[in-house]
Image: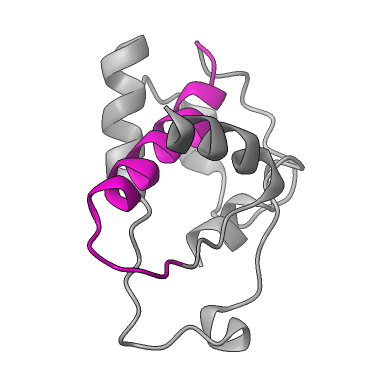
Amino acid sequence: ETYSSLSTISSSIVAQPQYKEMGVTDSDINVDVSLGQMVEKFEQLFGEIQLTACDFEIKIGAKGYNCGKAPGNNRLVVVDFRNEYVTNYIKKSPDDKILVLFGADHIKGMVDLLQQ
């Protein structure tokens, strides 16, 4: 649901079908980082996020975020940090079979990390 909301303000984020539609059940494990973890990582890398009056006026799900650009490189958090988090879990997992549901921007980075 978070990514569905975020996809309305950034064309680079693609909303995936709901987990139920993809056959994911309550017994499956979601290893992705939370939105809070992403914010924490972003602030570690680039400093505290400073919201403007414009940010407080924007409603979640509104089309066209136009309050300026965040400092730093969002890809380091949205793609790279999440790739590292998930691949670290996979490397330590005792499971024989693991299904990873991530977008195309993550595949090469995850494969590279798993081969290290």
Residue at x 40%, y 31% (from the top left corner):
81
Q: Is residue 48 visible?
A: no
Q: Is residue 63 left or right of residue 70?
A: right
Indicate yes or no whether the magenta region holds residue 89.
yes
Question: Looking at the image, which is closer to me, 19 or 98?
Answer: 98
Residue at x 66%, y 52% (from the top left corner):
7
Q: Main secondary structure of the magenta part?
A: helix
Instruction: For the C terminus, give its image quadrant.
Output: top left
Q: Is residue 3 visible?
A: yes
- Depicted 116 relative to depicted 31: above or below: above
- Depicted 32 relative to depicted 36: above or below: below
Q: Is residue 65 left or right of residue 78?
A: right
In the rendering, at what x and y percent does residue 50 appear?
37, 19
Indicate yes or no whether the magenta region holds residue 71.
no
In the rendering, at what x and y percent does residue 43 appear?
30, 20
- Depicted 80 relative to depicted 62: above or below: above
Q: Is residue 27 left or right of residue 19?
A: left
**What range is drawn magenta here?**
72-98
Please state the total of marks drawn on the protein image: 0
Residue at x 33%, y 87% (from the top left corner):
26
Residue 109, picture quadrant: top right
In the rendering, at what x and y percent does residue 55 appear?
50, 34
Residue 61, picture quadrant: bottom right
In the rendering, at what x and y percent does residue 31 appear?
33, 58
Residue at x 59%, y 50% (from the top left corner):
6
Q: Is residue 88 left or right of residue 5?
A: left
- Depicted 21 relative to depicted 10: above or below: below
Here the colouring is one colour
Question: Looking at the image, which is closer to me, 24 or 54?
Answer: 24
Question: Looking at the image, which is closer to me, 116 or 87?
Answer: 116
